[in-house]
């Protein structure tokens, strides 16, 4: 009886089923792998800059290239500061970028507010014209700017490059800030005016503080545009004392020799300020870029 019962139990037992893989877990894994792949692709150029900067010059043209150099030479970082005008180039880029961004933000803030609040049949046309100016190649603007600065006696001066930078920063920042002002309800300003504030006071005390993330995003985006400029600086400046960082780095390319270690070391150090500022203002940038995407 016991043997029969045990046999029946074994015969009727079913194999234990394996846990099924849910589709949600699969998509989560695929999303993680895609993010990891994008992260590696984004950070690899920075790593390769560092790899090239510390690789000895006699191993730079080695094939196949080594992902991890067997010998490391950090002298390029010190020689850039000691033997070149890198500190002057970095100071020039900082001065011209900050000055142009400050001027562009003041003009763009008032321009964006006027386009958002004082709407007419021409306001939308003006907004799209500002956007269309960003599609014009910089070389097209360089020739008339060169002639204007030549007549004004501003060629080969930092002021010329500051004015040139504002020409493409203002349309870009105005378009970004307009979307942010559109997301702010006008009733807030009307309530302030009911309490006795003037239209300018309502703008300065109500709307302007609410545009902090948008202004931060516009400032960082405009600074990146100015910091990486090459064509305007090459066309308008000639004195080495006025060079920004981009022109200074390009000077390491000689007629017969290319100093790759110095190029990558100076490029890496020139990229760090932008990366630090971007990471510090990340939450403002995300909020500013998504402003106006959803209508209230």
Image: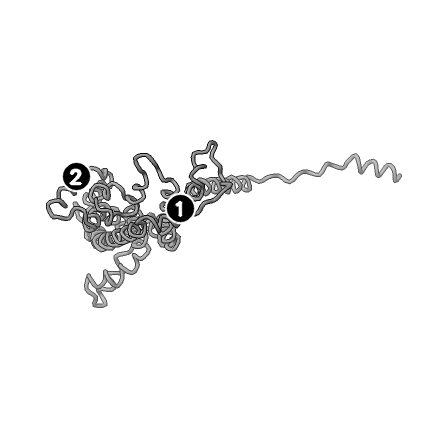
Q: Residue 136 location, x and y as percent?
A: 22, 38
Picture quadrant where residue 202 is located = bottom left
Q: Residue 289 location, x and y as percent?
A: 34, 49
Asked whether residue 197 appears in the rendered view, the answer is yes
Extreme left residue here?
151
Q: Secondary structure at mark 1?
A: helix
Extreme right residue here?
1
Q: As displayed, is residue 195 above or below residue 136?
A: below
Q: Residue 154 location, x and y as percent?
A: 15, 48
Q: Residue 157 location, x and y as percent?
A: 19, 49
Which residue does the image show at 23% across and 47% down from the upper left? 165
User: 7 left or right of 208?
Assistant: right
Which residue does the image show at 48% across and 32% down from the upper left? 64
Picture quadrant where residue 59 is located = top left
Extreme bottom residue here?
196
Question: Label 1 near label 2: C-beta < 8 Å?
Answer: no
Q: Secondary structure at mark 2?
A: helix
Assess disc 2: are there few (<14), some (14-19) or many (≥20) residues with their C-alpha within 10 Å of its C-alpha: few
Please name the residue that numbered disc 1 is placed on: 76
Which residue does the image show at 21% across and 44% down from the upper left? 238
Quick one: label 2 or label 1, which is nearer the N terminus? 1
Please name the residue that numbered disc 2 is placed on: 143
Gap in Å between the C-alphas at discs 2 and 1?
Answer: 37 Å
User: 70 left or right of 122?
Assistant: right
Q: As displayed, is residue 49 above or below residue 186?
A: above
Q: Nearer the viewer, residue 219 or 109?
A: 219
Q: In front of the other: label 2 or label 1? A: 1
Asked whether residue 295 appears in the rendered view, the answer is no
The circle drawn on residue 63 is none
């Amino acid at each position: 009886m016991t043997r029969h019962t045990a046999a029946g139990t074994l015969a009727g037992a079913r194999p234990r089923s394996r846990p099924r893989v849910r589709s949600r877990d699969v998509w989560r894994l695929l999303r993680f792998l895609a993010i990891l792949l994008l992260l590696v692709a984004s950070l690899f150029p920075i790593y390769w800059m560092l790899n090239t900067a510390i690789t000895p010059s006699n191993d730079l043209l080695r094939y196949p290239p080594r992902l991890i150099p067997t010998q490391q030479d950090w002298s390029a970082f010190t020689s850039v500061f000691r033997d070149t005008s890198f500190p002057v180039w970095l100071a020039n880029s900082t001065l011209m970028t900050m000055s142009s961004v400050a001027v562009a933000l003041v003009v763009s803030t008032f321009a964006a507010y006027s386009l958002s609040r004082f709407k007419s049949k021409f306001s939308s046309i003006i907004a799209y014209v500002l956007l269309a100016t960003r599609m014009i190649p910089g070389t097209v603007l360089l020739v008339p700017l060169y002639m204007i600065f030549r007549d004004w006696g501003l060629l080969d001066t930092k002021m010329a490059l500051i004015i040139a930078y504002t020409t493409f920063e203002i349309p870009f920042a105005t378009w970004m800030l307009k979307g942010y002002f559109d997301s702010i309800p006008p009733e807030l300003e009307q309530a302030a005016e009911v309490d006795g504030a003037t239209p300018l006071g309502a703008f300065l005390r109500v709307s302007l503080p609410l545009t902090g993330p948008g202004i931060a995003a516009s400032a960082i985006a405009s600074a990146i545009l100015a910091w990486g400029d090459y064509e305007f600086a090459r066309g308008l400046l000639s004195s080495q004392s006025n060079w920004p960082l981009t022109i200074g780095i390009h000077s390491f390319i000689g007629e017969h020799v290319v100093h790759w270690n110095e190029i990558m070391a100076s490029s890496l150090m020139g990229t760090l300020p932008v990366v630090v500022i971007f990471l510090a203002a990340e939450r403002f940038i995300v909020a500013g870029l998504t402003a106006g995407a959803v209508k209230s």
